Amino acid sequence: MPEPGAADALIARVRFDATGLVACVCQDAATGEVLMVAYANADALRRTLATGRATFWSRSRGELWEKGATSGNRLDVVDVRLDCDGDAVLVEVVPAGPACHTGSRSCFGDDGGGIAGRLRATIAARAGAPPASSYVARMLHAPRAHVARKVGEEAVEAIVEEPASARLAEEVADLWFHSMLLLARDGLDPLAPLAVLRARHAGEATR
């Protein structure tokens, strides 16, 4: 997020259209998944930057609206950036619930967000399925010690794999995936580590 003093400078660089609006592309800060597109005027952008909550201009109602103010499905803003021409805004967010009014995670469908987003969606879908229906469902219903032990086994396999071998990436992929299952089994977002890494990277960049 821009510093308070930089908010006005950022807004001054926006090329609003003839109606005073600019398109805002809301993107999951952890996965890169595009969640929704909305429009904002200068006041909406100013409120977004001041509160850290994505706020837009409703073209149908003719008023400002904070995403999730009623539903609770808010978008907590991590960063706001302009494109090279200044006529579009990228709003990186951490979603607290579905972004789409239909109940879908994304207005572009729940299968977006690349492989990371699809894996998260698959894990979520399997969580309510009978254990016998799939390996993922079985792991999610297994005792925590069993899932944690599997993560440990995959870590050992990655460590002992021949350096630079063709299978090393496969072993690391298994480690990542089972780590996601452990997080999901504990009721956490399987992609939570990506948000942690992003925050750490942002902290390093400011030093």
Image (cartoon, rainbow, N blue to C red):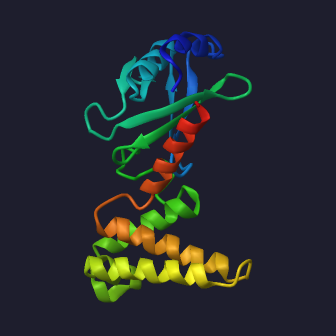
> What residue lies at 32% left-to-right and 83% top-to-bottom?
146
Please say if 32 is above or below 42.
below
Q: Residue furthest bottom?
A: 132
Would residue 28 be seen by someone viewing this image from the given angle?
A: no
Q: How many marks?
A: 0
As drawn, 152 above or below 19? below
Question: Quarter-wise, where is residue 178 in the image?
Answer: bottom left
Residue in the picture at 41% in, 52% down? 105
Q: List x then y, in percent, for residue 89.
A: 59, 28
Whether residue 8 is visible? yes
Name which quarter of the figure residue 114 lies in: bottom right
Q: Residue at x 47, y 39 (%)?
A: 93
Left or right of residue 165, residue 205 in this image: left
Q: Closest to the observer: 84 or 78?
A: 78
Measured from the top left, where is residue 34 in percent x and y?
A: 54, 46
The image quadrant where one finds the C terminus is: top right
